Image: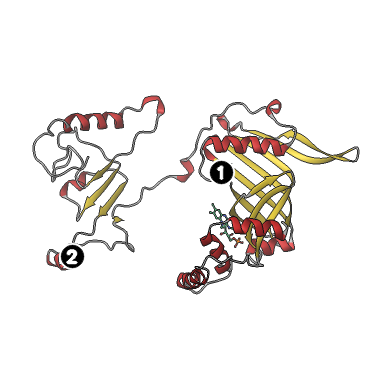
Amino acid sequence: MFGFSFHGTPRPPFDDLIHRLTCLQSNNLNNQRKPAVVSVDIPSGWHVEDGDNSGNGLKPDMLVSLTAPKLCAKNFHGSHHFLGGRFVPPAIAEKYKLNLPAYPGTSMCVRIGKPPQVDISAMRENYISPEFLEEHLEADPMNQFRKWFDDALAASLHEPNAMALSTADKDGRPSSRMVLLKGVDNEGFVWYTNYQSKKAHDLSENPRASLLFYWDDLNRQVRVEGSVSKVSEEESEQYFHSRPHGSQIGAIVSKQSVVVPGRDVLHQEYRELESKFSDGSVIPKPKHWGGYRLKPEVFEFWQGQTSRLHDRLQYTLEKFNGKEVWKIKRLAP
Ligand SMILES: Cc1cc2nc3c(=O)[nH]c(=O)nc-3n(C[C@H](O)[C@H](O)[C@H](O)COP(=O)(O)O)c2cc1C
């Protein structure tokens, strides 16, 4: 509801709507998250200067004051107060001595309240998941990974193929970053990147890495460790040309991990290449761009449980009668 200043009590049908919204905010049924209420300018049911003097108005979590905060905003106790709109010409702001904050960039709103202070040490989740038992496991960890990946897809998670890739240089100094999984088969896990980047430099000195998937809504994490090698030129070539035009040009422009004088430089070079290839000609894959494949030696499937008694099932590749077999162990959480 878009409020506007008024006196007296709210009229039908707004009185009922406001009542329903305030009830939704106070009823915390089944520990469900309360809906967040954002009020624009004057919260519904409030007096423009005195605030919620009836006690029946909305109690917004966020207030977006328009032009300048009204007097009632002094009674706003939510965590997020923003100023919205760019309605005040500088001459008017000066004439009325309005002390308005600068809007960042082209943004239409700016935070004017203090961001909420949280006690990080008190932040914790209680994980509730079905039991994860040895008998639920696939004998082959690749199949187990596919099963969990399918669950992540079915749960419509955002970018379930995003994974943290950790490498270490020749002195053992580790570094991590996110990359996107672009293929998984019996040979391993594939991602694409720049062969002159920091991660590529680490991998040239120390061709071992670890991957980490975290699927928040499923309380699940998967760790994979192993040796890394480049995929074939042919495979990289094929994937490169399957990418959108813009990403192909971006891969040529970005000399990943080197210092750039400013973002304009990248955009200028991008525009030049965009016009060069505007006739639809094939964009050649740069030599320094391609894929890596991690061949797994260790997997760990973790599922969060109550009281921190999480399930951790680890697969390690071990030699048995001259053959490599996957051994499964349960680890203490
Ligand atoms: C969700 C997400 C996905 C990413 N995917 C890739 C990727 O597939 N390949 C890549 O080179 N960088 C990717 N990046 C950027 C990397 O995290 C990183 O900034 C970049 O590769 C440079 O890392 P480096 O300097 O350690 O080599 C991604 C970043 C995020 C947040």
Quadrant where ligand 1 appears: bottom right
Residue at 68%, 65% (x, y): give it: 201
Question: Taking 223 as reference, is 271 left or right?
Answer: left
Question: Taking 128 as reference, is 141 left or right?
Answer: right
Label 1 CB sits under 8 Å from any ligand 1 atom: no
Q: Which residue is mark 2?
A: 89
The image quadrant of residue 147 is top right
Q: Of marks 1 and 2, which one's residue comes earlier in the chain?
A: 2
Mark 2, other Cα within 10 Å: few <14 / some 14–19 / many ≥20: few
* Residue 250 place in picture, x, y as percent: 54, 64
Element marked by disc 2:
loop
Label 2 CB sits under 8 Å from any ligand 1 atom: no
* Residue 239 place in picture, x, y as percent: 63, 55
Front residue of this view, candidates 288 and 43? 288
Question: Taking 62 as reference, is 95 left or right?
Answer: left
Front residue of this view, candidates 284 and 205? 284
Disc on res. 160 = 1
**What separation in Å lies between label 1 and label 2 (alpha carbons)?**
46 Å
Residue at 56%, 43% (x, y): give it: 160
Which quadrant does the N terminus fall into? top left
> In the image, is residue 282 above or below residue 140?
below
Amino acid type for the residue under numbered disc 2: Pro
* Residue 103 place in picture, x, y as percent: 29, 61
Amino acid type for the residue under numbered disc 1: Pro
Residue at 58%, 66% (x, y): give it: 283
The colour style of the image is secondary structure
> In the image, is residue 114 above or below residue 270?
above
Residue at 33%, 62% (x, y): give it: 104
* Residue 252 place in picture, x, y as percent: 58, 67
